[in-house]
Image (spheres, rainbow, N blue to C red):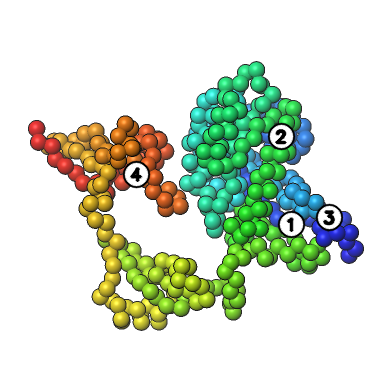
Amino acid sequence: MHRDDEHYISSDFGPMFHYQYRLILIGDSTVGKSSLLKYFTEGKTAEISDPTVGVDFYARMVEIKPGYRIKLQLWDTAGQEKFRSITRSYYRNSVGVIVVYDISNRTTFEHVAQWLNEAEANVGGPQPGQCVFQLVGHKADLNAERQVMYEEGEYFAKYHRIKFIETSAVTGENVQEAFTMVAREINARIESGALRLVDGWEGIKCGMSSEMRTNTAVNHWRHRKPKEPIVPEPDEGEFEAEQIMDKRVSLCGRRVHYLVKWKGYPMSENTWEPPTNLVNCKELIREYEKLHGNETRYRKPTARKRNRHFSKTVSPSGRATKRQPQPLEEHKLEETAYCYSRTGEREWLIYKDVHDYLKDQLIEFYERMLKVHVVAE
């Protein structure tokens, strides 16, 4: 096959693509998600139609750089509350999430944080923390009726460290760019090793055969694994355990984890693994138990840490009274909650926000972790 440059793709192969990315659009009903997708995939403004029922599917090929083609698989979700349980199931296999609001309807912007929290809690894949999020302010053609300033959307996006753009499916303003931005960001994370292809996950798929990748001089398989550390492995896709370093057991005794030293990796790459992940390491586990069986560490938090920031009071009748947080100095003026993020970092959050978005988890936290004080009448 003749090539003019390294990115040339012969027309004999038809509409081939290098990667396929699955994106999901979320947001309140009537913000214009379907109109955006209609304009992006068909190049025309959608007529007024009924709200989406469940989930609709669209697809389009984009070129993010000369000769580098990406197929975008786009899922349009219903914004109505009664369909939320259906749409949640589509987060797991998405590598990109586009949150849409209507600049002429402030309520849709106020719900963005709720949509974003729901998406972050449900995205899946091998690295959920690397899923690409983007905020889109739609209906930019209705500037005279604007209720959400551009700076507000920009500030919200910067605060949450996501991309932001305003679009219009009527004029076509920034519609193409909105989707191309997401595709470029996903591709950049693949090239850096932050995202990789995994069998059984639909978020990212490789579209070209190995022969075509060689012919186009684009070696995509090198992006399937992080570049560092580069360690030759005899069995591709398998990690070999070298030694069991430690063991910990939950307070109830039901959960057991072993600290594993992986062969060919430094100590900083050691990981805690449950026995179900170590079916081929029975000899190593037996050896560790024989030498250190009496040194098991129980993951029991101390009373000081558990009750450091909060207490809950209960009257003699058994009815709970108002929760009384005991915040640090800089949090005296507001009721706050000390929470763990998805990355394991601890941070102070406004109690109202936690109650709105993590209500069930918060109740469970109070019931299991906080000391109960009886108030004498």
N-terminal label among 4 and 2 = 2
Residue placed at 24% from the left, 36% from the top? 324
Q: How many residues crowd mark 2 within 10 Å: few (<14), some (14–19), many (20+)?
A: some
The residue under label 1 is 18
Q: Is there a contact, CB below 8 Å, between mark 4 and mark 2?
A: no
Quarter of the image where the C terminus is located = top left
Q: Closer to the observer: label 1 or label 3? A: 1
Q: Between marks 3 and 4, how big is the CA–CA gap?
A: 55 Å
Residue 277 seen in render: no
Q: Secondary structure at mark 1?
A: loop
In the depicted view, which residue is nearer to us: 78 or 284?
284
Mark 3 in CB contact with mark 4 (< 8 angstroms): no
Residue at (65%, 45%) from the top-left corner? 182
Q: Earlier in the sequence, mark 3 or mark 4?
A: 3
Nearer-N-terminus badge (1/2)? 1
Q: Is residue 190 left or right of residue 246?
A: right
Which quarter of the figure has residue 197? bottom right
Quick check: 287 above or below 11? below
The residue carrying pointer 3 sits among few (fewer than 14), some (14 to 19) or many (20 or more) residues within 10 Å by Cα, namely few
Task: Find disc 3 in the rendering and name its residue.
Answer: 14
